[in-house]
Image (cartoon, rainbow, N blue to C red):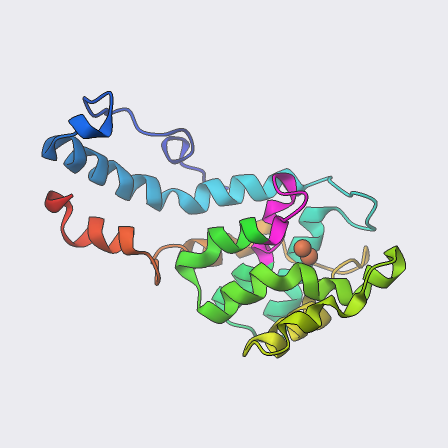
């Protein structure tokens, strides 16, 4: 996998202020330029972080990376478009940092690049996955019903039924992370919902 080390580890130019109140137009033009390069490195950092799920089973039949690949593969083979497949690939990327709220982390990462519906599915998949196991832990498997009035309820239930709850098969022939890498790069190349990206790309001198 081709990973840009500067994208992962950061830039070298620096602004000259100790507090933002001292920032100049030149400082912010420099930062705006660096932001563009930093933002373009997002897929590299996301792909690197996704690899942290490899070998992390947590008691499940497959590790969290294999689960993610299997979920994305099932969605891809079912004809879903690239933003959907990338959402499926990344939906559990927050497992390493958000043990108690991992869907929030993945949802935040994909938010600038996907539709409101895909963001909603990602953010709420935890409660919807509960339909398949909460009752085994003395919890309410119908906890997802609190979201019944959402226009995205059925789409989230479908994601969990078809691709997420079914992606724990040790014998499934999942595609590799390299297979999905170009999709991640294409989906994350252009934010569809990011005020800061629009401001920096359209009028950097006015920062
Ligand atoms: Fe999850
Ligand atoms: Fe999952």
Q: Which residue is depicted at the point 70% across and 47% down?
A: 64
**Which quarter of the rendered picture does the C terminus lie within?**
top left
Q: Which residue is depicted at the point 73% across and 60% down?
A: 173
Residue range (magenta): 89-103
Q: Is residue 78 left or right of residue 133?
A: left
Position of residue 63 relative to residue 88, above or below, is above
In terms of depth relative to the viewer, which is nearer, 34 or 140? 140
Q: Is residue 159 left or right of residue 203?
A: right
Within the image, what quadrant is residue 32 found in? top left
Does the magenta segment cover residue 102?
yes
Q: Is residue 186 left or right of residue 23?
A: right
Position of residue 98 relative to residue 81, above or below, is above
Q: Which residue is depicted at the point 69% across and 66% down?
A: 128
Look at the image and tell me whether residue 152 can be seen. Answer: yes
Residue 189 in the image, given as x and y percentages of width and height: 36, 55
Residue 13 in the image, given as x and y percentages of width and height: 23, 25
Does the magenta segment cover residue 199?
no
Position of residue 101 relative to residue 192, above or below, is above
Within the image, what quadrant is residue 79 found in? bottom right
Residue 6 in the image, given as x and y percentages of width and height: 36, 31
Look at the image and tell me whether residue 166 can be seen. Answer: no
Within the image, what quadrant is residue 51 found in? top right
Q: Is residue 181 left or right of residue 37?
A: right
Residue 186 in the image, given as x and y percentages of width and height: 40, 58
Callout count: 0
User: Where ligand 1 lies, by quadrant?
Assistant: bottom right
């Amino acid at each position: 996998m081709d990973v840009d080390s500067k994208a992962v580890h950061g830039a070298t130019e620096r602004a000259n202020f100790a507090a933002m109140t001292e920032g100049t137009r030149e400082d912010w033009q420099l930062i705006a330029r660096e932001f563009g390069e930093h933002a373009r490195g997002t897929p590299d950092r996301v792909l690197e972080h996704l690899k942290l799920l490899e070998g992390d089973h947590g008691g499940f039949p497959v590790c969290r990376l294999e689960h993610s690949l299997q979920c994305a593969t099932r969605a891809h083979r079912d004809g879903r478009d690239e933003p959907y497949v990338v959402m499926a690939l990344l939906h559990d990327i927050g497992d390493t940092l958000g043990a108690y709220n991992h869907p929030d982390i993945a949802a935040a990462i994909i938010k600038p690049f996907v539709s409101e519906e895909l963001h909603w599915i990602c953010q709420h998949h935890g409660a919807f996955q509960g339909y398949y196991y909460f009752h085994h832990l003395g919890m309410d498997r119908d906890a997802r019903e609190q979201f019944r009035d959402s226009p995205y309820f059925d789409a989230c239930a479908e994601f969990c039924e078809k691709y997420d709850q079914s992606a724990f098969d040790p014998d499934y022939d999942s595609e590799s992370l390299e297979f999905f890498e170009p999709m991640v790069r294409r989906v994350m190349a252009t934010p569809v919902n990011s005020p800061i990206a629009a401001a920096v790309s359209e009028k950097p001198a006015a920062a």
